[in-house]
């Protein structure tokens, strides 16, 4: 039988800033910001300002800078948010319970120790040097948004660069003596956009698959599935983004409390692995249905 937490609303824990002091991660995170900001400057100075169409420049400049701002905001939120570290000063529910031999935290179900962060992380997916943090239970939403906005911004730049070139080629403006030679700034912008689109789209696809199947990267390699877990991809999605559709979903605002009214408790399996109450209700309904079908 799973342990059960009180139905009353628990007091919210004070938020603290989380930062991993890893040299490689700091360099990669700083390089990410530098590439995005430099791409924004090159796009504005080399492509949008020289155009004579003011509406064209304003529209595409606004769209790209909006996507870049959302991507950097999600990146900062991913980097500075505790991914779900297990406190090291808590006592196990049973005396002498298992603890992590590296950090001393209680060994929870679906928690893995990160050698870079030096802590056990709940539902750890992987440690990403580009955000200088682990991707875990509490910051997976922000990493997913960072990947999405990065891929969209890079795709926007690729379209701005490739569509005019393909149109001029289709009109026959290219020949052996008139092949366009873009400047070094546009080549740099193309390479940065291509890299951003590839990495962002791949990361987004991997995270979506992990959310829908309720498996992190470690569990996928070990051919294991988290038990028990939500029964559908939609329930898994709401567990990451929040159970109520709101304007916070596409932004990097903190997640609302999963149980704001205190109307239902949260079951705990093993040493504190949270389970959605809807899963327990669905399981009980299935059991009741099987009992009614028995002769």
Image (tube, rainbow, N blue to C red):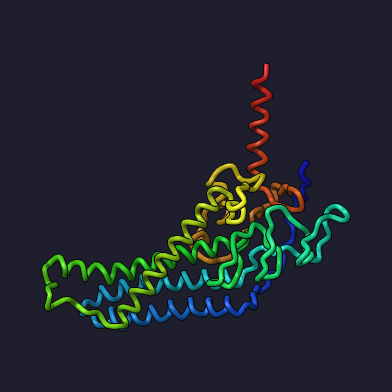
Quarter location, residue 240: bottom right
Is residue 239 visible from the viewing direction of this image? no
The spot of residue 101 in percent (x, y) is 78, 63
The furthest residue to the top: 295
The furthest residue to the right: 95
- Left or right: 102 in relation to 83: right
Q: Nearer the viewer, residue 295 or 13?
A: 295
Q: Residue at x 74, y 57 (%)?
A: 10
* Relative to 291, residue 278 above or below: below
The spot of residue 193 in percent (x, y) is 37, 71
The spot of residue 14 in percent (x, y) is 71, 69
* Relative to 148, residue 37 above or below: below
Quarter location, residue 241: bottom right
Check the picture and name the quadrant holding the C terminus. top right
The spot of residue 154 in percent (x, y) is 38, 69
- Left or right: 4 in relation to 216: right
Check the picture and name the quadrant holding the N terminus. top right
Q: Residue at x 33, y 71 (%)?
A: 157
Q: Nearer the viewer, residue 262 or 133?
A: 133
Is residue 259 visible from the viewing direction of this image? yes
- Left or right: 295 in relation to 184: right
* Relative to 214, residue 83 above or below: below
Mark count: 0
Q: Residue at x 28, y 79 (%)?
A: 47
């Amino acid at each position: 039988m799973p342990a059960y937490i009180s139905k009353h609303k628990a007091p919210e824990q004070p938020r603290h800033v989380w930062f991993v002091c890893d040299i490689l991660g700091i360099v990669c995170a700083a390089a990410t910001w530098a590439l995005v900001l430099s791409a924004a400057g090159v796009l504005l100075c080399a492509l949008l300002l020289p155009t004579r169409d003011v509406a064209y420049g304003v529209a595409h400049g606004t769209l790209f800078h909006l996507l870049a701002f959302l991507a950097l905001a999600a990146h900062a939120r991913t980097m500075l948010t505790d991914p779900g570290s297990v406190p090291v000063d808590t006592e196990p529910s049973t005396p002498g319970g298992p603890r992590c031999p590296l950090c001393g935290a209680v060994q929870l179900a679906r928690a893995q120790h990160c050698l870079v962060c030096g802590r056990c992380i709940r539902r750890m997916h992987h440690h990403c040097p580009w955000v200088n943090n682990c991707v875990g239970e509490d910051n997976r939403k922000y990493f997913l948004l960072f990947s999405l906005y990065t891929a969209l911004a890079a795709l926007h730049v690729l379209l701005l660069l490739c569509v005019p070139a393909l149109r001029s080629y289709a009109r026959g403006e290219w020949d052996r003596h008139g092949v366009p030679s873009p400047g070094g700034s546009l080549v740099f912008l193309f390479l940065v956009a291509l890299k951003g689109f590839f990495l962002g789209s791949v990361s987004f696809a991997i995270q979506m698959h992990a959310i829908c199947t309720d498996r992190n990267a470690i569990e996928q390699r070990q051919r294991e599935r988290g038990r028990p877990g939500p029964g559908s991809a939609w329930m898994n999605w709401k567990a990451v983004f929040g159970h109520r559709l709101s304007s916070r979903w596409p932004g990097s605002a903190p997640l609302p409390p999963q149980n704001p009214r205190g109307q239902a408790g949260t079951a705990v399996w093993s040493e504190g692995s949270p389970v959605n109450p809807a899963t327990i209700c669905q399981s009980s309904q299935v059991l009741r249905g099987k009992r009614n079908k028995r002769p």
